[in-house]
Amino acid sequence: MDIRIQAADTLRILDFPRRVCLWRGVKRAIRYRGQTRSDMGEDCPEKIDVEFLRYIWRFRKREQDRIEKRLVEAKTVGKQVIWLKTRQEVKSYLALLESNSAIM
């Protein structure tokens, strides 16, 4: 995370409810079961197990404070932080980006 923050000028945070993250993780695991997705390392087939589900469910509680601290630090050095919490916010943000790129 630190390397990505240093390299970026804008940080886009997708902060969905954990039930949404859990559902999407299950759906993705079923869809790609036994396959290696293009965004994963070689020989790393998709799988689903209790450990993975537990990781998703506990992620926010375990990592939220650390992530928020790093984002506050990023803002103090001039990084833009965009916090998106719903699918509609993501759609609106993407539409804004598309309209801005059409203008350029």
Image (cartoon, rainbow, N blue to C red):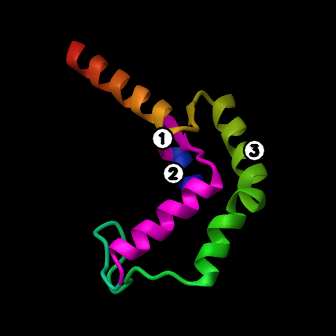
For the C terminus, give its image quadrant: top left
Q: Which residue lies at the image location 78% right of the left edge and 50% below the top edge?
A: 65
Amino acid type, residue under disc 2 in the picture: Arg
- Label whose residue precedes the other's in the sequence (2 or 3): 2
In the figure, is residue 31 to the left or right of 87? Answer: left
Which residue position holds label 1?
8
Secondary structure of the residue carrying tag 1 is loop
Which residue position holds label 2?
4
Secondary structure of the residue carrying tag 3 is helix
Amino acid type, residue under disc 3 in the picture: Lys
Query: Within 10 Å of the Cα at label 2, are there few (<14), some (14-19), or many (20+) other Cα atoms?
Result: few
Residue 83: image location, x then y, percent: 58, 35
Secondary structure of the residue carrying tag 2 is helix
- Res 92 quadrant in image: top left
Which residue position holds label 3?
69
Magenta-colored span:
7-33
* Marks 2 & 1, CB-CB < 8 Å contact: yes
Residue 76: image location, x then y, percent: 69, 29
Q: From the viewer's perspective, is residue 84 above or below residue 45?
A: above
Q: Which residue lies at the image location 49% right of the left edge and 66% below the top edge?
A: 25
Can I make out residue 104 in this image? no
Of the two numbered discs 1 and 3 in the rendering, the one whose residue sits closer to the viewer: 3
Query: Within 10 Å of the Cα at label 3, are there few (<14), some (14-19), or many (20+) other Cα atoms?
Result: few
Q: CA distance from mark 2 to mark 1?
A: 6 Å
Residue 3: image location, x then y, percent: 54, 54
Q: Nearer the viewer, residue 44 or 73?
A: 44
* Marks 1 & 3, CB-CB < 8 Å contact: no
Q: From the viewer's perspective, is residue 80 above or below residue 33?
A: above
10 inside magenta stretch: yes
Residue 70: image location, x then y, percent: 69, 45
41 inside magenta stretch: no
Amino acid type, residue under disc 1 in the picture: Ala
